Image (spheres, grey):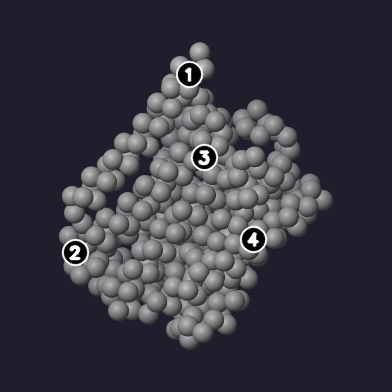
């Protein structure tokens, strides 16, 4: 655990330091978010959070290769991490080009698929579908399709939610901590090695997300841009995929000690990335339905995302982001905990927390309106 904290700290510190350099580079290259009607920022804002976060991931990886415990781990651990960094660099490069020149949706999609295929070619892919008490083996074609599909879906969901200062980085950072908790506890309880590519990736991912937040949280000094949002979505998806290669199929399909929650545990490597970014996925689904019903492209921008609606009902920019953090944490940690443990007490606690978050979303603007009358 201590070495994972070192990885987390290195990723955080390097990302924080590189962000200032990246911000100046964005100004120099003209990678700046202009103020548009659908935007919530009032002045042009530099991009390039992605290169800073990629630098943090690379630094964390290099340090991990020299740590006493992690460096003695199975060779596939660092092979998987290298593959994810290579794929992440490719998708970050696509995002950088988009931040500077504004690529069309099809070109970005092609870049996402290419990065996913590269990762598969380097060995990071699903090899089976975990099921309760058993598993379903996948051939090479099935594994590639499922892997690339999960990667592209997660990348686009994170990209969709990147609409308020610090929102995407904060949600993915929370999800990364939740996934790290799941992977580490599963390794301990099943007697597997704690040197895991999934844990190493999520520790680094949590670090880079928190490292960029001082620059990106409201009031932001820079945006992470498509280079950043696509990168962190990519790493999150690949972390889940690499987990299935760490454990025997039955270890995941049986959960912890054959618990009553084993059905959830069986599918967690598949559903956790979606659960972590469930808010972005819901937002993305609603946006696609809304735009197609209006006869527009699903990729055409508008100002009707969930975060825009929170602002419309009276929440401040900062509070809207914090409320979405709270909702994301409830979903991510709720899925993890219910997959590992069971009991009515957990249901009661999470039910109460959910009610409190829902009440805050609905009632706080009304309460403030009455106070300021």
Which of discs 1 and 4 lies nearer the camera? The answer is 1
Q: Is residue 349 found left or right of 96 in the rendered image?
A: left
Question: Dot 2, how many residues are within 10 Å of its Cα: few (below 14), some (14-19), or many (20+)?
Answer: some
The structure residue drawn at horizontal position 27% and vertical position 46%, both measured from the top left corner, is 349
- What residue occupies the far right of the structure in this picture? 28
Q: Is residue 286 found left or right of 103 in the rendered image?
A: left
The structure residue drawn at horizontal position 72% and vertical position 46%, both measured from the top left corner, is 46
Identify the residue position indicated by label 3 in the image: 321
The structure residue drawn at horizontal position 44% and vertical position 84%, both measured from the top left corner, is 74
Q: Is residue 164 found left or right of 355 in the rendered image?
A: right
- How far, Cα to Cα, is label 1 from label 4? 41 Å
Mark 3 secondary-structure assignment: helix
| Pick the front one: 87 or 332 | 332
Identify the residue position indicated by label 4 in the image: 15
- What residue occupies the far front of the structure in this picture? 371
Classify the position of the N terminus by image quarter: bottom left
Question: Dot 1, how many residues are within 10 Å of its Cα: few (below 14), some (14-19), or many (20+)?
Answer: few
Identify the residue position indicated by label 2 in the image: 259
Q: Position of residue 103 (x, y in %)?
A: 67, 47
């Amino acid at each position: 655990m201590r070495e994972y904290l070192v990885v987390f700290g290195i990723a955080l510190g390097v990302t924080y330091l590189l962000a200032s350099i990246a911000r100046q580079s964005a100004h120099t290259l003209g990678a700046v978010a202009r103020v548009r009607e659908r935007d919530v920022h009032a002045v042009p804002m530099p991009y390039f959070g992605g290169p800073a976060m990629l630098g943090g991931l690379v630094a964390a990886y290099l340090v991990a290769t020299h740590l006493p415990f992690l460096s003695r781990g199975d060779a596939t651990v660092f092979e998987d991490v290298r593959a994810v960094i290579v794929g992440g660099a490719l998708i970050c490069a696509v995002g950088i080009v988009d931040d500077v020149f504004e690529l069309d949706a099809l070109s970005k999609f092609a870049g996402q698929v290419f990065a996913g295929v590269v990762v598969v070619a380097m060995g990071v892919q699903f090899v089976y579908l975990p099921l309760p008490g058993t598993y379903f083996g996948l051939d090479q074609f099935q594994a590639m399709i499922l892997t690339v599909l999960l990667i592209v879906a997660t990348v686009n969901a994170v990209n969709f939610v990147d609409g308020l200062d610090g929102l995407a980085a904060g949600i993915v950072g929370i999800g990364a901590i939740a996934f790290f908790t799941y992977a580490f506890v599963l390794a301990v309880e099943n007697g597997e090695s704690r040197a895991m590519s999934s844990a190493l990736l999520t520790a680094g991912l949590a670090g880079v997300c928190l490292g960029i937040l001082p620059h990106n949280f409201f009031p932001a000094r820079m945006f992470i841009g498509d280079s950043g949002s696509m990168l962190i979505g990519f790493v999150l998806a690949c972390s889940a995929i690499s987990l299935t290669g760490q454990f025997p199929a039955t270890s995941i399909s049986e959960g912890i000690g054959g618990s009553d929650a084993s059905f959830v545990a069986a599918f967690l490597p598949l559903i956790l990335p979606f659960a972590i970014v469930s808010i972005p996925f819901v937002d993305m689904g609603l946006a696609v339905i809304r735009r197609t019903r209006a006869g527009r492209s699903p990729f055409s921008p508008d100002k009707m995302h969930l975060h825009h609606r929170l602002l419309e009902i009276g929440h401040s920019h900062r509070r809207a982001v914090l409320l979405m953090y709270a909702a994301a944490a409830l979903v991510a940690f709720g899925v993890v905990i219910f997959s590992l443990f069971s009991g009515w007490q957990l249901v009661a606690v999470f039910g109460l927390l959910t009610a409190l978050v829902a009440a805050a979303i609905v009632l706080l603007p009304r309460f403030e309106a009455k106070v300021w009358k």
